[in-house]
Amino acid sequence: MAVLVTGGAGYIGSHTSIELLEEGYDVVIVDNLCNSDKIVLERIKELSGKTPKFYEIDITDKEKMEVVFKENEIDSIIHFAALKAVGESVSMPMEYYSNNIGSTLVLFELMKKYNVKNFVFSSSATVYGDPETLPIVEDSSLSVTNPYGRTKLIVEDMLRDICFADKSLNVAILRYFNPIGAHKSGRIGEDPNGIPNNIMPYITKVAVGQLPYLNVFGDDYDTADGTGIRDYIHVVDLANGHVKALEKLSENPGLVTYNLGTGKGYSVLQLVNAFSKASGKEIQYKITERRPGDIAACYADPTKAEKELGWKAKYGIDEMCEDSWRWQSQNPNGYKK
């Protein structure tokens, strides 16, 4: 029996695939490579010593996806594949709704046909919108401030409805906060196409001289230094959270929801300073206007995941920065030669 990992060649998906392989799972990766590279598959093999099965498919293509289900005994699905840039979603909402919601519907139609019962959904802390209280717990009120977050919340609502109608399903909704860092080897990491939308790859590209400075979007938030506060989590910690979620689903819990974060918030400027310390590089930055959809502060209460999954983040902000720098400094052009 195998775990189907959609978006398994992407940033979080590749790290999770390694952790799954190291734990003895058979892994089938489906990825259309729109934001990843085939070299990732070679490095997954290099680091894990095992070769995952791979299909280059867009998962909104139900006919091609059915081949994956026919050719493999799929036991569980971890669904990463999605468009994920907040700013881009504001300018391209149709693409986000079509891809992020449509792909999930395809998976559940095929799960029903092929009797697959276990599903882990890659959700996001964006479903909490501008939180009323901090830290954020799983039963905090839900709202969104951008189309990306809305696609995540719509899919969560779909999952709740589907699980209510079919009590045989086991679904884990994992709401993660802000993944950064890279594999300790420096062989895989975050490699976005074009100008990065996420803060850490932007910082690392400034550090290697590919970008002149970091744009800091707003310094007038109600925070200690005026810049936005986020809960940054090491991508390997996040990957381990998915392994723990799969273990939980083997207990037939029905629908469960967990925050995956450290419980600590760092401002943009604190992150910049931590990275400068880890890399020995001065990071130039400019203060610019706030981005639409951004909020002042967002950090998790991860108690439930620790209690029910036996999961807790191990790595601190210094290690996240050190590993991000190791990846970028060893691969200044990412996976491209």
Image (cartoon, grey):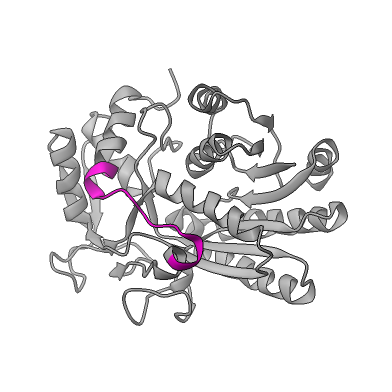
Which residue is located at x 63 percent, y 39 percent? 25
Q: Nearer the viewer, residue 111 or 60?
A: 111
Specify whether 94 is left or right of 136. Answer: right
Quadrant assignment, res 265: bottom left
Whether residue 191 appears in this view of the structure is: yes
**91 vs 26: above or below:** below
Residue 247, given in percent of the width and then of the height, sits at 59, 54
Q: Nearer the viewer, residue 127 or 96?
A: 127
Q: Nearer the viewer, residue 163 or 50?
A: 50
Which residue is located at x 43 percent, y 31 percent? 188
Q: Nearer the viewer, residue 225 or 241?
A: 241
**175 vs 106: above or below:** below
Residue 87, given in percent of the width and then of the height, sits at 43, 56
Residue 169, given in percent of the width and then of the height, sits at 74, 65
Indicate yes or no whether the magenta region holds residue 309: yes
Quadrant assignment, res 122: bottom right
Quadrant assignment, res 259: bottom left
Q: For the N terminus, which image quadrant? A: top right
Residue 31, given in percent of the width and then of the height, sits at 64, 38
Q: Which residues are magenta?
A: 307-320
Q: For the C terminus, which image quadrant? A: top left
